[in-house]
Structure formats: C-alpha cells, structure tokens
Image (cartoon, rainbow, N blue to C red):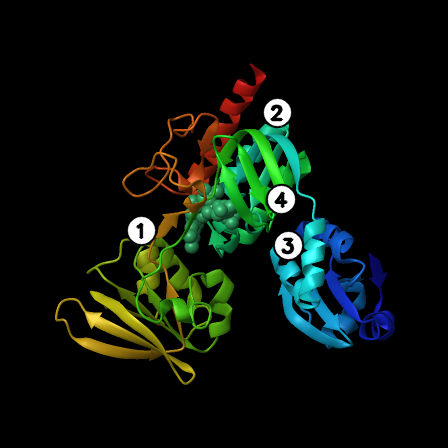
C-alpha cells in the first residue's frame, strides 16, 4: 500500500493506469473500519489495480480540487480518469469489490474470485448490531475478559448516532448531540478491547450452529450470540415512496434536514420521533407541514407544546398521504382528508416520514419466537427461544424502547453470559 502526497497525484495516480485512492484522516472511526478491508482487497487485486492512500488533513489542496469533503473517500481511476462510484462513510467491502470488478475483464474477476480463501474466526460471544444495546453488552463482556466481536451492517452507534440531540440520557446536564453520545459509547467498548467488524454484509446466520458469515467469505463462530439489531423505519407503502426514497423522501432528519434551508417540507407522523424531529427540521425549513392520521399527536405533551408554538409549523390532522410524485423541482404529496374523504395535492420541497419502526429480524429465518408485533420474545435474562441466543434493545419484545432500556438489556445479557461461560 503506497502513501502519496498531493505532488505525486499526477505521476502516481493519473499516469499510473488503474488506481484506487483512499483519502483518510486520523481519529476517524469509518476510516479505521475501512483499513482492514482495503488491506485485504489490496492483497487480492494488487497485481491489477494499485492501492494508494493520501492523508486528507495534510493534503487539503488535492482533496478540495477533487471535491473530497469527508473521510474516508475512495476514488477509482482508470487511465487518468475517474471511474465507478465514489464511496464514502461506512464503506462496505462488497461496494469496493463492485467498483474494482468493473475495472477488470470478467475472466480476470472470475480468476481472482477463485483465489479467495474463505476462513473462520472464533469468539466466545458474537453480538449482531452495535447500537447502545450491543455496545453495552460488548463493554461488559470485554471487561469480564470474554473474547467478543461486534458485527454491524452499518457503523457503530445505531439510531443514536442519527438523533440530533438526546436530552434524557442520564449523566449529562445539557442535551447531547446523538453522534457524540454514540461515538463515546463505541470508543469506550473499542478501547476495552472488543473487536468490531462494521460496515459489513451479513450474508448468513445459523443461530443453532452459532455461525455468522460476513462478506461471504469470513465465518464467525461463537459460543453465544446476542442479537441487537434494533429497528428500521416503517414505510407508508404508497405509490412513489420507494422510487423517491433518498430523492426527496427521507427517514432521517439529522441526515437530511440541512438540505432544506429556506425550503418547505412535509413531515408525516405524530409520535415522539415525528414531533421531535419536526422541531429540529424547523431550524432549517421555513415551513413544516405535519400530516397525521389521528385527531391529535401521540408524542409527549412537552414536545407537542414546543412544536405547536413554533410559527413555522402548520398541522393537518386526520389526513393521510396517498401518493408522492416529482413535479419539476417540487414534490407533490397526494392527501386524503379522513373525515370527509376529500382529496387534495400539496406541493412541497421534501418529505420526512416518521411512522413507527419495525424489528430487524429478517436475517434469522423465522426460527425465533416472536410477539404479536414481530419482536423477539425473551425471558428476563434476555434469552430467546434458541439456547445460547440472546436478544437486547429495541429488537426485543418490550414496552419501552429507549437508549436507557437498550443499555439495561445489554447489561443483563452480558452478565448472564459471563456467568454461564465461567461455569
Ligand atoms: C428518530 C429517533 C429519535 C430517538 N430519540 C431518542 C432519545 O432522545 N432518547 C432515547 O432514549 N431514545 C431515543 N430513541 C430510541 C433509541 O434510539 C433506541 O431505543 C436505541 O437506539 C435502541 O438501541 P439498540 O441498540 O437496540 O438498536 P439501534 O440503535 O437501532 O441499533 C441497531 C444496530 O444494529 C445494526 N443492524 C441492523 N440490522 C443488522 C443486521 N442484519 N446485521 C448487523 N447489524 C445490523 C444497525 O446498523 C444498528 O447499528 C430515538 C429513536 C429514533 C428513531
């Protein structure tokens, strides 16, 4: 792996045939997550494609010239021209391979694939999901000197890293930015010594054999598994929603509200998430229209009062979206008044949808016992219906889903596992 400086860019990248260039920074968790994947792919593809790194902070001129504003960023070059899709943030091995394969002849890709040697890693405990529940379990297990790995399809932190401010997590006088809280949680667990395999594809899970396959080639074998996969946002399932997801329809205010400075948006939903996130969006958007199916919001009273006192907020109760459509640079939201059946269309700049969450359990192939809402049933020690498999946090059947309840579950599962492994 060669490290270059701005001055080398012309000779080492533009005139060097096929190159993949990694703009990295220090103190950058996604860069740390990328490093082992980049190294192992260099071993496989290194004869055909040059793997190079450039330290972004020290080579700002080059980064800015190439429009690189985040670390890590991977750029692919072929014959002096950028090719493929730029990758940034929590970069998956499969996405890098997709770009690398596109730079080579199909026969060569087949040949390289046949050289891939699958391997197995062994741990005492594998935790699937590294939100607050998984991270807390990882911390307790690590402090008990139990060999633990955390596996996540994204970066560590879960929902908290995407929550703009958390005001109800004890120990802090002032509200904390969610990304900072989740960063501190994951660094604490990492510093203790738990291993992280993040931004990976979890391609197969066998709960009975306690095996998890990641990126199709590494099998993780464990004595115990903790499921901490949390929840994902529900869709409304109306025409246009899937097509416009990420192109005007968002499920994350922290990620996307900043794009709506001086614009108007519609927020669908009326629970705590919808009301709190709408309040955050008013820091950017000049008008937020709340569309909610019931005749009052379900969010806590304090959050409702704050939102409703905000002059930028307009409310349409007893209304439901029926379709979304792009009309020029505007988004059309088809609405139905649930009292009168009257149909109307609202033109806006963007739509945020917060209509509840569903448990992330698709991986587990219907083997585990569920409650009526599809959440994983556990006993009070967090044991699921399969021996040696635990579930913690939002994915488990329970009444209240909060950071504090997720970390409590993680604590309980870890202490129980520690006792079992010690016996
Ligand atoms: C918009 C919003 C605002 C919120 N605000 C607050 C608040 O202010 N205070 C509060 O206490 N709570 C809040 N919550 C709730 C809180 O975030 C959750 O209760 C908490 O994050 C649950 O933690 P968890 O570890 O169970 O799951 P999550 O935080 O959901 O983490 C799950 C992790 O599992 C990973 N994962 C998912 N599927 C897979 C898979 N197949 N393989 C591997 N990994 C996988 C995900 O990438 C994620 O990192 C909020 C939630 C939302 C949605």
**Residue in the image at 58% along x and 17% along y:** 422
Left or right of 290, for residue 108: right
Front-most of 367 and 379? 367
Q: CA distance from mark 2 to mark 4?
A: 20 Å
Q: CA distance from mark 3 to mark 4?
A: 11 Å
Q: CA distance from mark 2 to mark 1?
A: 39 Å
Q: CA distance from mark 2 to mark 3?
A: 31 Å
**Dot placed on the residue nearer the N-terminal end, 3 or 4:** 3
**Residue in the image at 50% along x and 72% along y:** 259
Residue 197, disc? 4
**Dot placed on the residue nearer the N-terminal end, 1 or 3:** 3
- From this viewpoint, which residue is outermost toward the bottom? 328
Does 104 sit above or below residue 153? below
Callout 1 touching callout 3 (CB < 8 Å): no
Q: Is residue 188 visible?
A: no
Quickly name the residue at label 1.
Answer: 300
Does 297 sit above or below residue 116? below
Mark 1 residue crowding within 10 angstroms, few (<14) / some (14–19) / many (20+): few
Disc 2 versus disc 4: nearer the observer: 4
**What SS does tag 3 mark?**
helix
**What SS does tag 1 mark?**
loop
* Percent coordinates x, y for residue 211 in the rendering: 55, 35
**Dot placed on the residue nearer the N-terminal end, 2 or 4:** 2
Quickly name the residue at label 2.
Answer: 144
- The image quadrant of residue 57 is bottom right
- From this viewpoint, which residue is outermost toward the top? 423
**Dot placed on the residue nearer the N-terminal end, 2 or 3:** 3
């Amino acid at each position: 792996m060669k490290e270059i400086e701005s001055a080398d860019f012309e000779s080492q990248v533009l005139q060097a045939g096929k190159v993949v260039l990694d703009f990295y920074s220090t103190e950058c968790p996604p860069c740390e997550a990328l490093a082992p994947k980049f190294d192992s792919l260099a071993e496989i593809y290194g004869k055909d494609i040059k793997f190079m790194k450039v330290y972004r902070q020290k080579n700002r001129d080059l980064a800015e010239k190439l429009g690189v504003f985040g670390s890590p960023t991977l750029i692919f070059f072929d014959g002096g021209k950028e090719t493929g899709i730029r990758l940034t943030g929590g970069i998956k091995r499969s996405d890098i391979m997709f770009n690398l394969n596109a730079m080579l002849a199909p026969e060569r890709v087949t040949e390289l694939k046949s050289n891939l040697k699958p391997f197995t890693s062994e741990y005492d405990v594998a935790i699937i999901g590294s939100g607050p529940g998984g991270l807390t379990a990882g911390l307790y297990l690590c402090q008990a000197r139990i060999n633990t790995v955390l596996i996540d399809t994204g970066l560590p932190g879960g929902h908290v890293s995407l929550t703009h401010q958390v005001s109800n997590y004890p120990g802090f006088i002032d509200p904390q930015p969610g990304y900072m809280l989740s960063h501190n949680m994951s660094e604490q667990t990492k510093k203790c010594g738990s291993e992280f395999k993040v931004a990976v594809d979890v391609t197969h899970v066998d709960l009975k054999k306690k095996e998890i396959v990641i990126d199709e080639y590494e099998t993780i074998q464990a004595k115990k598994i903790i499921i901490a996969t949390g929840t994902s946002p529900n869709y409304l399932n109306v025409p246009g929603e899937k097509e416009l997801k990420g192109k005007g329809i968002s499920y994350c205010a922290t990620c996307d509200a900043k794009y709506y400075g001086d614009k108007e948006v519609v927020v669908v939903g009326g629970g705590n998430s919808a009301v709190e996130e709408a309040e955050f969006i008013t820091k950017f958007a000049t008008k937020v229209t709340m569309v909610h199916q019931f005749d009052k919001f379900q969010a806590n009273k304090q959050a409702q009062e704050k939102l409703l006192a905000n002059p930028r907020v307009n409310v349409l109760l007893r209304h439901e979206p029926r379709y979304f459509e792009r009309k020029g640079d505007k988004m059309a939201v088809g609405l139905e008044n649930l009292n009168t059946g009257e149909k109307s269309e609202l033109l806006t700049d963007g739509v945020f949808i917060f209509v509840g969450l569903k448990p992330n359990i698709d991986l587990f192939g219907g083997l585990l016992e569920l409650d009526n809402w599809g959440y994983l049933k556990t006993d009070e020690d967090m044991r699921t219906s399969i021996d040696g498999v635990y579930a913690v946090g939002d994915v488990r059947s329970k009444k209240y889903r909060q950071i504090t309840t997720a970390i409590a579950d993680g604590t309980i599962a870890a202490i129980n596992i520690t006792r079992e492994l010690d016996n």
